[in-house]
Image (cartoon, rainbow, N blue to C red):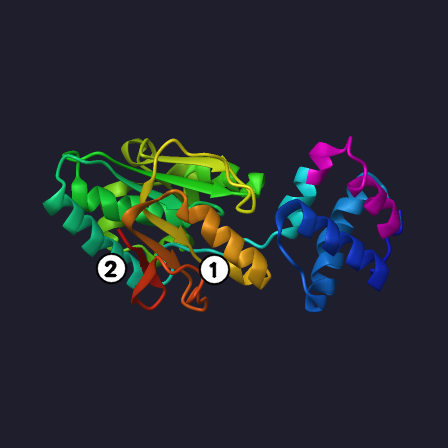
Amino acid sequence: MQVSSSISEQSFRQVRDWLYQRSGIFLNDTKRSLVCGRLQKRMRELELASFEQYIRVLLNPAEQLEHELAVNILTTNETYFFREEKHFRFLEKVAAGHKTTTPAAPFQVWSAAASTGQEAYSVAMVLAQQFGGYQPWSVVGTDINTAVLCTARQAIYPIEASRKIPQDLLKAYALKGKGKDEGWFKFRPELCQKVSFEPLNLMEPKQFNYRFDLILLRNVLIYFELEDKQKIVRNVLKFLKPGGYLLVGHSESIHGYDDRLQQIQPACYRLKA
C-alpha cells in the first residue's frame, strides 16, 4: 500500500495538538518532517494510506493501545551513560555528605525522564560505590514512553554504549556477554535490585509515598512550553525533601521558577529547608 509521503500542515497540527494534550510535549514546526517519518512506518503496519486516516485512530477514545504506541513513537529519547559528567561528581559529594551526616537514613533518587535507563544505572553505580551494602539506597526511573522502560528493565545494552562508564564501575557492576550474547553487557542483579522503573506523565505525576533526596529532571524541559515547564517543576518539587537537590540539563534554566530553589552550581539547585 502506498503511504502518503508528506504530511499536510493541518494534519501536522492535529498530531501536534493531540500529543500536547496527551503528554504536554509541544512539537514546533521544525518537527514536521520528524513526525511524518516516524508515523509513516506505523501507517504501513496498519495499512493506512493517509495521515487523515491515522489521525482518526488517534482521536478515537477506544484506541488506547494505539495512543500509547503513538506517544512512544513521537517522543524523543536521547541518552547515554554518565551524560553531563559533572552532575555525577556532584552526586558523589551529596551522597558522601549524606553518609557522614545521616548514616542510617536511606538515600533515594528519582530519574524523572529515565528513557532507556542509562541515567538511572549511572546513578546506581555511583551510589553503590558510595554506600556499598552498609546503607540503604534506591533509584526510581520514570518515563511517559513505555517502550523505553521495557529496555531499561532488561538492563542489557550494546557494548559500545559502555564507553562513557568508568572502567572500575563497569568491572564492578556489569557482566560482559559471551557466546550468543557477545557484543552486549548486563548489569549485575544486585545492582538491578536497587533500581525500578515505572510509567509516569510529568504533567500529571502520581503520588509517591515518600520524598527523594535528589531528583534528576535533565534534558526534558526543553520539549515543553514555559508554563508547562513551570508546572512540571512544581510537580516534582512536591516529592523532593527539604534540603534535597534538583538537577536539570546544562542547556536548561529554571531560575525564578520557585523561590525555594537555591542554585548551588550550574544546573544544580537545592530546595531550601
Query: Residue 222: x percent and y percent?
Result: 53, 63
Residue at image coords 78%, 42%: 58
Tell me if residue 175 is in the magenta stretch.
no
**What residue did someone put label 1 on?**
219
Location of mark 2 (residue): 89
The extreme left residue here reads 100
Q: Do the numbered discs 1 and 2 sit on residues whose CB atoms are within 8 Å?
A: no
Mark earlier in primary sequence (1, 2)? 2
Q: Nearer the viewer, residue 176 or 138?
A: 138
- The location of residue 158, given as percent across then percent down, is 44, 48
Amino acid residing under circle 2: Arg
Camera-side residue of 243 and 8: 243
Is residue 156 visible in the rendered image? The answer is: yes
Secondary structure of the residue carrying numbered label 1: loop
Q: Quadrant of residue 121?
A: top left
Disc 1/disc 2 C-alpha distance (Å):
18 Å
- The residue located at (35%, 57%) in the rendering is 260
Indicate the position of residue 172 as horizontal and vertical percent values: 22, 43
| In the image: residue 199, left or right of residue 98 | right
Seen at 24% across and 59% down, the residue is 89
Where are the magenta residues, as a range?
A: 51-67
